[in-house]
Structures are given as C-alpha cells and as structure tokens.
Amino acid sequence: MNGNYHQERSRLIQQHKEEIKSIEKEIKSKRGTLKEQYQRQLEEAQKRHEDEMKEFESKYGNSEEKTKKGAKPASSSFSLGGGEKCNSEKTILYEERQWNSLSKSELEAECKLRGLNSKGSKEDLVTRLFIFTADQKSKLSKISQNDQDSIQMVESRGKTSGQLESSSTKKFTMVSSANKFTPPEINYSEAGGTGRRKGRSQNRKVDHRKNAKPGQNSWAAFCARNDIPRKKNADLNIHENSNSESSDGEENEKEKQSSSEGNHSEGESSVENGESESSESDSDSEDIDEEELAKRNKRRAVMVKVLEKMFSSITINEKKNGLKLSEIQGQLTRLNVKNFKPELLGYKSVEDWVSSQPKSVLTYDEGNQLIFPPGYKIPALSKSKKEDPYYVDSLSEKEGEKSDDDFFM
C-alpha cells in the first residue's frame, strides 16, 4: 500500500507541475488582457491542485499517519541553519515561494534548509520543494483552526550570516527566509503592453566605428578611435581658399623682386628661382596638415575610380577620337559627381589634374587637349614631309638626277 500510495502521489504532483508549467509559458508569451486571464487561470489551477491533494490525502492516507492520529500530535523536528532543534511539541512551517522563478543556487539553499537532498537538476529541486510544500499544507489542514490562528511569521532583520530566525507560538514555529533578497513582483501589463520595465531606455546610440577592426582603414573609423574632430566641407573650402590666396600673394611679391633684380646674371636668377620654388613647396607642405593630406589622397583615389567608370561607359567613337578637356565636367556630372573642384585634390586646374594622372589611368594629348583611355598611342604631333608616304618632293628628285658636272658648266 505504501509503495502504491507514493507512486500515485508523485504522479498527481507531476501532472500538477506540467499543467502549471504550460500556463506559465502562455503567460510569458501573452500581453495585456490575455496575460491577465492566464494569471487568473494559474491561480485557479493552484487552488484546484490543493483541493485535489487534500482529497487524495483523505482517501489514500498512509497507515502510519492514521496510527499517529490516535496519539498526541508529534511534530517533525527540522534542523535550522544554526543547528538547533525544536521541541517535540512544536511544528515548523516553512515559507512557500514561487520555486520556478528561483535560481538553482537559491533552490539548493531552500532544500538544505528543509533537510532535503540538494543534488540534481533544477527541475528535480523544484519537484522536491513542490512536494514538501504540499505535505506541509496537508498537515496544516488537519490542525484545528484555533492553532492555525496563532501562527505568526517572524522575519530575520539585519542578518547577514544567512541564519534564519524562528518564533514559537503554542505548538507551531514559522520559519521565513526573509533575509534573502526577493525581487518585487512587477505587472508588466501596466508598462503599456510591451513586456518591458518602465524607465529603461530603449534607444541607446552606440558608436560602432570605435569597435572597428584594424583592417578597416576608413578615415571616419580612424577619427572615431582617436577622438579627432572632423571638419566640414565648408571649413575645408575656406582653408584651401586662404592657402591659395596666400600662395598667390607670395608669387606676386617674388615677381616684383625678380623684376627689380633684373641686372643679375641668368645663372643667379635660375638659382634663385629654384630656391623660391623649393621654399614654396616647403611652405605648402608645412601649411597642409597630415589630416588634410590623408583626405586629399582619399579624394584622389575616389576620382581614379570615377575615371575608370567614365571610360567604361563612353562610346567607341569617343574612345577613338578622345574626349575634349572641356567635356570632363559634363562627364563627371553624368556620373553623379557634383561640385567637382581640382583644388580639393591639390591641383590648380583640371588640366593639371588630368596631366598628372599616370598612363595606367588615362592618356592625355597636351597639344590637342584630348583625353584617351589608358594604353592609347598618341601619333606624332608634326611629321616631316619625307616621313609622309603620300608626299612627293619633285625638287629633291630632280636634284638627285643632276650630276656634279652640271654645276661646273
């Protein structure tokens, strides 16, 4: 009988546990009014389970418990955290908690407190605690109402060692683990049906450029990692215009000096011009920052790709005849390159920019100001008449026919 009793009892508890677990899953997935309905359903299920356990205990109670009913009610003595044992006339009642919401370490502590086996998985610990609380409720239902009214809960305040405080009134002792922090129950449906707590910021701006990999060599990532302030395009234009104006003023002053010193020799003037050019280049290099040089190199690389795209999109006749220098601006606007200025690339004019490109990018005919794709062979600018196969020099032929004797007639 005892074996069948325990099997039936564990089977009933397992059914109750599965039903509660399925309802809790629905509560987590639902929002608003549906969630409230499932919460009510959970409360009803818990009450129904208690009634079923009471009926089961009344019908299939142990013979040992029946024999104990005839004698005086001897309470089970459970060991407390401090190791002290209660008297035989007292019964210890432990606090009931939501076991599914506790962590495994907390469940192990609760099992040790109740004298249960604390080994196994989290589900095993929850099952043991459910069974223990059901037994406690069944025992409490068999006690008279007057004794139940005398039960009090005494919380342990200011305890840091983990020991629990108990108070005995008449025959009962209530043990509470109030020294442990229990999170407050929050109704997430009141937070607008979003399932999130109030006050938590949802939109957090994170600068992902600071977490860029070392292989990412973009200028924006470099500035973000090193906290370098970036300049706007308007500031760059103003800076470049001021540099160009200062360079023009220096050139005018040097021209005046060269005109006043025109009596010097050509060798000395050439040396001075070389020194002035070197000083200009030095001053330009000093004025330009490393940041501006990096931006300029980046713009040049972008424009090289634009030129490659331009040559791939033009017609065959344009490739053979070449593009005029004046047509470059229109080709760039066709490729969605707006507000192009050669000064942003470090050149004074479009022709300087085109002529400085390597032959692997384009071929430039300076005499006719034509631009051809890379690999195009430019014909000679001025061929001699003798190299022209269609030209016949009659005078040269007649002179060739004359002999030396004709000059000494």
Image (tube, rainbow, N blue to C red):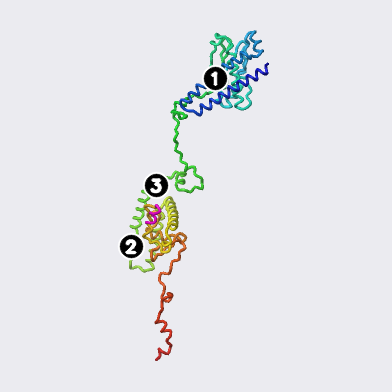
In depth, the one of 331 and 89 nearer the eye is 331
Q: Is residue 283 visible?
A: no
Above or below, 254 against 392 in this view is above
- Identified by mark 3, the residue type is Lys
Q: Quadrant of residue 18?
A: top right
Task: Give, as a three-letter code, the residue at label 1.
Answer: Gln
In front of the other: 354 or 274: 354
Q: Neighbour class for label 3 at 10 Å: few (<14), some, many (≥20)?
A: few
Q: Earlier in the sequence, mark 3 or mark 1?
A: 1
Q: Is residue 368 above or below residue 55?
A: below
Residue at horizontal 38%, vertical 50%? 236
Q: Nearer the viewer, mark 3 or mark 2?
A: 3
Q: Nearer the viewer, mark 3 or mark 1?
A: 1
**Range covered by the magenta-colored residues:** 330-336
Q: Name the magenta segment's main secondary structure.
A: helix
Identify the residue position indicated by label 1 in the image: 46
Query: Mark 3 and 2 residues: CB-CB less than 8 Å, in contact?
Result: no
The residue that mark 3 highlights is 231
CA gap, disc 1 to disc 2? 101 Å
Which mark sits nearer the N-terminus, 3 or 2? 3
Q: Is residue 139 left or right of residue 315?
A: right
In the image, taking residue 18 as reference, residue 288 lies left or right, namely: left
Q: State whether residue 251 is above or below residue 92.
A: below
Q: Is residue 332 magenta?
A: yes
Cα gap from disc 3 to disc 2, whole angstroms: 35 Å
Q: Quadrant of the N terminus?
A: top right
Q: Which residue is mark 2?
A: 255
Secondary structure found at label 3: loop
Kindly identify the amino acid type of the residue bearing the numbered disc 2. Answer: Glu
Horizontal and vertical percent for residue 329? 37, 56
Task: Indicate which disc, 1 or 2, sits on the residue closer to the N terminus.
Answer: 1
Indicate the secondary structure of the residue bearing disc 2. Answer: helix
